Structures are given as structure tokens and as C-alpha cells.
Image (cartoon, rainbow, N blue to C red):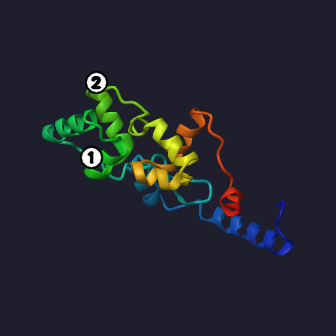
Amino acid sequence: MVGLTRLDSNKYKTLIKRKRQFVHFPTSIASEVEASGNRAIDEFGEMAVKRLKQLYRKDFSEDDIELIISSYQSGNTTIDLAEQFGCSKGTINKLLRKCGVNVTKAKAQAKLDDRVVIAMYKEERHTIEEIAQHFGVSSYTVNRCLHRNEVKIRSRWDYIAK
């Protein structure tokens, strides 16, 4: 009981002792739990789920799949498509790969013109967040662009000084 006071340690031991008393259930409850297949009773007498169920599975119609593929190939990102279709980015990625579409990680990076980003950052002294908002990408994407072009990133003190 490292890190617990003596009082807390005693409470913890009492709780564990009480939980262990409930491990022995009537046979009707135990057989019901075993029949479910996905649940079991752990060592403390609590119901434990072996595998979490997926909350929902998104099924797409053929028209939706064609729209997703054409939208992605015309320049939309997987994040945009996920928001549009009410699912996760991973679901869109998996669907595109299943349909034979080459999914790239640099879709947002393609929206940026390196020369313009560098000029906005160095000469016009815009912040990374302002540049990201201008191009409709994340600040992380702009930051990667600047690092790739070996631009020195300003600290917060550089903004206060000027």
C-alpha cells in the first residue's frame, strides 16, 4: 500500500475483503453469466466484459461509397469525409483502401504552398495558427511544413518583443 495513509490503507483492505466475499454467487446467476459468452465474473465478484462491443457499425450504400471515393480523389481529406458521413477517419481510410484507393497521409500537406507559408510566417509575421486557419489545415500541418523547409520557429517571447 505504497503512497496511502494508514487510514486509507485500512479502508482499501476492507473494501477488497468485502468484494472477495461476494465472489460466490448462486448457481442461477453464474450460469446466466456463463451463457452470455462475452461476460465473466472477475476475482472481486464484479461483472467483467471480455471484449467491448462496437457502438455501431457504419454501413455505406453503393452510392455513398462512390461519393466518398470521388470526393477523396477530388481533394477532400478523410477527416472532412468522416464529418460529412458521421463516422471516424479510420472508417473512411479502411473503406478507401478496401476499394483500392491509395490513401496518403499528406492530403492536407498538398493544400499548402511552401513558399507562401514561409512568406506569411517570416515576412508578414503571421502565427502558425493564423496560417493554418487561412489554408484550412491544422497548425500541426503548418508546423511540419516549416520544419521541412528548415525555418526557425519563433518562441512566444518573439511576439512580445515586437
Q: Position of residue 83 (x, y in %)?
A: 31, 52
Pick whichever, 65 or 11, lies toward us.
Answer: 65
Q: Which mark is residue 121?
A: none
Please give left or right for residue 143 compared with residue 77 in the image. right
Label 2 sits on what residue type?
A: Gly
- Which is nearer the N-term, disc 2 or disc 1? 1
**Would you say the residues marked 2 and 1 are in contact, meaning their CB atoms lie under 8 Å apart?**
no
Q: Position of residue 110 (x, y in %)?
A: 40, 35
As helix, strand or loop, the secondary structure at mark 1 comes to loop
Q: Quadrant of the C terminus?
A: bottom right
Q: Quadrant of the N terminus?
A: bottom right
Q: Position of residue 155 (x, y in %)?
A: 69, 53
Q: Nearer the viewer, mark 2 or mark 1?
A: 2
Q: Position of residue 102 (x, y in %)?
A: 34, 26
10 Å neighbourhood of mark 1: few (<14), some, or many (≥20)?
few
10 Å neighbourhood of mark 2: few (<14), some, or many (≥20)?
few
Above or below, 44 relative to 15: above
What residue is rendered at 53% in x and 46% in y?
140
The Cα–Cα distance between marks 2 and 1, rounded to whole angstroms, is 19 Å
What residue is rendered at 34% in x and 34% in y?
94
What residue is rendered at 43% in x and 34% in y?
106
What residue is rendered at 52% in x and 43% in y?
119
Q: Which mark is residue 58?
A: 1
Label 1 sits on what residue type?
A: Lys
Pick whichever, 154 or 98, lies toward us.
Answer: 154
Which residue was labeled with disc 2? 100
Please give left or right for residue 31 compared with residue 75 in the image. right
Residue 86 visible (yes or no): no
